[in-house]
Amino acid sequence: MYGIIGYPLSHSFSPDYFREKFLRLGIDEIYSPFPIESVNAFRQLLKDQPDLKGLNVTIPYKQEILQFLDEIDDTAAAVGAVNCIKIDNNRTKGFNTDVAGFRNTLEPLLQPHHRQALVLGTGGAAKAVCYALHQLNIPYQIVSRTESPTRYNYKSVDKSTLENHLLVINTTPLGMFPNVYSCPEIPYENIGSGHLLYDLIYNPAETLFLKKGKMHGAAIQNGYSMLIAQAEASWDIWNSYSL
């Protein structure tokens, strides 16, 4: 048995993706959503579901789950977020497949002028994005609701900011179904044809963030290809080795 933890999970991509995958492979496996209202329910879930061999982790537990795991992969430890757990002989190990999923789907889209990035958001997904940007040698600036010496806030993002950061990545849930009429508050009128806007959201396929960017001539990418890449990476981990 495999599954995903988070809350809520009513529109999660993973259950349908893995059920279809298991059908294609002709294997008798189960993938179920486990919407736990608190990360403190994780250990009880393992007791209640002794057949679990692997879990995906989504909002809001990618960072909180670390304290409950027996072991953490080097990448996940460096990022400070886990989105994949392998379970073997009652031991748990956390991994982060968001890093490779994002990096491998962003890299083919990059142009020589995409030399600096704005990362909108500060959650677990943002940490994976920042780690991947570091691997790609792309300097980045984080944007959050509160300003600090190391972060911009949304009100401080202006024309000059966007002219100097032609790669803009949304890691927030703003615009995710069913709240499709929300988006990060940046001055979209300063977006142009040189920009690449990448949204980690996949539902809807074209968020308001992406629509506004497209309206001003930017190249756009949603999170669907990243989700497939990280899901396949999770499957490889679950089937790769024993803990």
Image (cartoon, grey):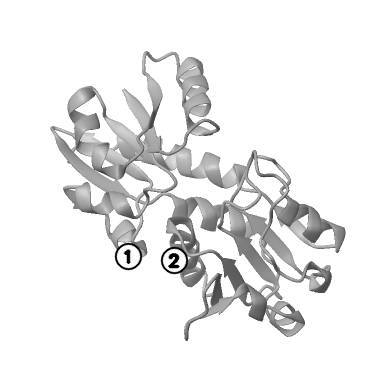
Which image quadrant: the N terminus? top left
Q: Position of residue 144 (x, y in %)?
A: 54, 70
Number of the label disc, if any, that sits on residue 124: none
- Alpha-carbon span between mark 2 and mark 1: 8 Å
Mark 1, Cα crowd under 10 Å, few <14 / some 14-19 / many 20+, is few
- Which type of secondary structure does the marked residue at label 1 adopt? helix
Q: Is residue 90 above or below residue 83?
A: above
11 left or right of 218? Answer: left
- Residues at marks 2 and 1 touching, judged by CB atoms closer than 8 Å: yes
- Which type of secondary structure does the marked residue at label 2 adopt? helix
Look at 19% across and 51% down and name the residue there: 71
Can you identify the residue that label 1 sits on? Answer: 78
Q: Is residue 40 above or below residue 51?
A: below
- In which quadrant of the rendered view does residue 51 lie? top left
Which image quadrant: the C terminus? top left
Q: Is residue 241 visible?
A: no
215 left or right of 108? Answer: right
Q: Is residue 95 above or below residue 56?
A: below
Look at 20% across and 47% down and name the residue there: 69
171 left or right of 193? Answer: left
Q: Position of residue 115 (x, y in %)?
A: 64, 77
Q: Position of residue 60 (x, y in %)?
A: 42, 48
Can you identify the residue that label 2 sits on? Answer: 131
First reached walking from the N terminus: tag 2 or tag 1: 1
11 left or right of 124? Answer: right
Look at 44% across and 46% down and name the residue there: 59
User: Which amino acid type is marked by label 2?
Assistant: Tyr
Seen from the viewer's position, the closer of residues 239 and 30 is: 30
User: Which amino acid type is marked by label 1?
Assistant: Ala
Q: Position of residue 159 (x, y in %)?
A: 76, 81
Seen from the viewer's position, the closer of residues 207 and 174 is: 174
